[in-house]
Image (tube, coloured by chain):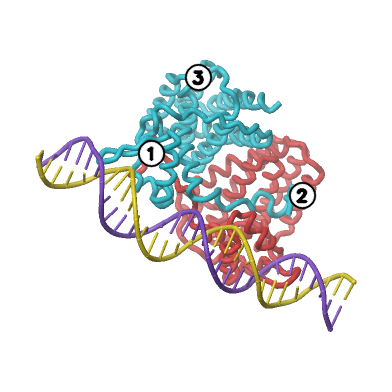
Chain colours: A cyan, B red, C yellow, D purple
DNA sequence: TTCTAAAGGACTGTTTTTAGTCCAAGAGCT
DNA sequence: AGCTCTTGGACTAAAAACAGTCCTTTAGAA
């Protein structure tokens, strides 16, 4: 049954799950690392807790952790006060090089172009607590001092932080997931000397607008900001 | 580890999967029925194909189908040209009555308020094929002739159709999923005599704007349209 | 030094899920 | 009437995933 472009079953009869639990767990953990949710040298929660959070058994989680460990992403220390740590060295991309697919690229960029500006506008409108403001500023300052190597995860973390300020769990989930897909795409193109200065000017502008409660500016600058990545990726489609 | 509102692991260390394959499959099928993807008396794809589509084994799928069958949602006919059919009778809600949770309600409404207007605007901007236009109009006319009983699934189908016109798979997925969550919420409140006339006027307006390519109007009317459901639900929070 | 508690490591038996194979029904064609 | 093909129905053996239990390591407290 080939998909007719419209009508019943189009795109709603998709797979119920993304693969087996083992693979999904690896994928998920790898994403949290690449998104900078767990920064290098940072400690992961204990296995028992992490397994519960991720909704898989400890055995399955351990299989996944083991795989990530001997792939160099994680380091493990036994004993009390031990734990699983993100490798401070690795996280270089393994030069995966499937070609970019136009449809996938456009889909990610389009969806991102909807949710991220909306998240920025919402955060600006939200009543922010002191803790929230501080969290945003911390992510921003970490991002400002990033090197080209550490830029991408910190950038992701900053944008996810914005979504968190909006207070919508769905939005955070959507932004994080979309960002992970975007990272996958970026991993497939050669690293260019991105214009970090310009991007960071925009980051500052966005953060300020949000903190001031200026939703219109926050949204507008975010849209402009996304253009950079968009045209970068589109450049590799031709 | 209680979730600190910000910082690492907030909302990204969520469960990798929603439950076991059996439950997920039931849930998924039930959604496609409630969303009107498969209308009453319509035939589902053969088990072998459906299983592949959903990414589960045929045994698991059959367990789920069996459950739905003796819950009265499906009817089965054996033999050639047989198949599994959506019950034309049932689909009345089992009066599930957990109380509404404010956070869940606000989250769904907010997220919906982002993606559905965006979908409408995008569709209006898209270059629509003749088949696409026809599909939209068909969904609209089915919706216009709906009775209060058949209104909700046709309404869902219409809104999903709009997302389909936008050409973005992610957006279709997001709209369908959000709509399913919304239906769950609506199932928990008593049915009121919704103002179908007013809603349908808006539906017509939206469809016309999309077909004319008037993105601004499509987006604006969609926003207004969503207000109806939003205030209906919010009314049951107090 | 010894003890303790928190962490990773390892094993076992059970349940779930799967792929694969064959059976049974039954509508339409010759 | 008989054939045929598509579909649901049923069974089996293997693999995946699970919950539960116990072992090992090790920093810090006593």
According to the picture, the residue beneath numbered tag 1 turns out to be: B5
User: Foreground: A148 or A124?
Assistant: A148
Find the distance from the CA under tag 1 to the CA under tag 2.
44 Å
| Element type at mark 2 | helix
| Element type at mark 1 | loop
User: Foreground: A198 or B60?
Assistant: B60
Residue B131, percent across and down? 80, 46
**Whether residue B152 can be seen here:** no
User: Foreground: B21 or A64?
Assistant: A64
| Element type at mark 3 | helix
**Whether residue B207 can be seen here:** yes
Mark 1 or 2 closer to N-term?
1
According to the picture, the residue beneath numbered tag 3 turns out to be: A200
Q: Does label 2 lie on the same chain as label 1?
A: yes
Exactly how many numbered labels are in the figure?
3
Find the distance from the CA under tag 1 to the CA under tag 3.
26 Å
Residue B104, percent across and down? 48, 49
According to the picture, the residue beneath numbered tag 2 turns out to be: B135
The answer to whether B80 appears left or right of A184 in the picture is right
* Residue visible at 39% across and 26% down in the picture: A138
């Amino acid at each position: 049954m080939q998909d007719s472009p419209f009508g019943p079953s189009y795109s709603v009869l998709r797979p119920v799950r993304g693969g087996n639990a083992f693979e999904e767990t690896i994928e998920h953990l790898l994403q949290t690392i690449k998104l900078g949710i767990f920064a290098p040298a940072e400690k992961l929660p204990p296995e028992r807790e992490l397994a519960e959070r991720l909704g898989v058994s400890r055995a399955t989680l351990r299989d996944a952790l083991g795989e990530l460990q001997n792939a160099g992403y994680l380091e493990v220390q036994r004993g009390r006060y031990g734990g699983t740590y993100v490798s401070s060295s690795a996280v270089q991309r393994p030069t995966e090089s499937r070609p970019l697919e136009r449809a996938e690229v456009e889909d990610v960029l389009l969806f991102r172009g909807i949710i991220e500006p909306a998240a920025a506008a919402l955060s600006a409108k939200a009543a922010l607590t002191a803790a929230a403001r501080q969290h945003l500023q911390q992510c921003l300052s970490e991002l400002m001092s990033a090197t080209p190597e550490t830029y991408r995860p910190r950038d992701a973390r900053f944008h996810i932080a914005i979504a968190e300020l909006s207070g919508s769990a769905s939005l955070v989930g959507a932004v994080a997931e979309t960002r992970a897909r975007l990272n996958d795409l970026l991993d497939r193109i050669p690293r260019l000397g991105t214009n970090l200065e310009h991007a960071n000017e925009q980051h500052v502008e966005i953060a300020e607008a949000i903190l001031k409660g200026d939703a219109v500016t926050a949204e507008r600058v975010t849209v402009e900001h996304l253009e950079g990545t968009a045209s970068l990726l589109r450049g590799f489609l031709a």
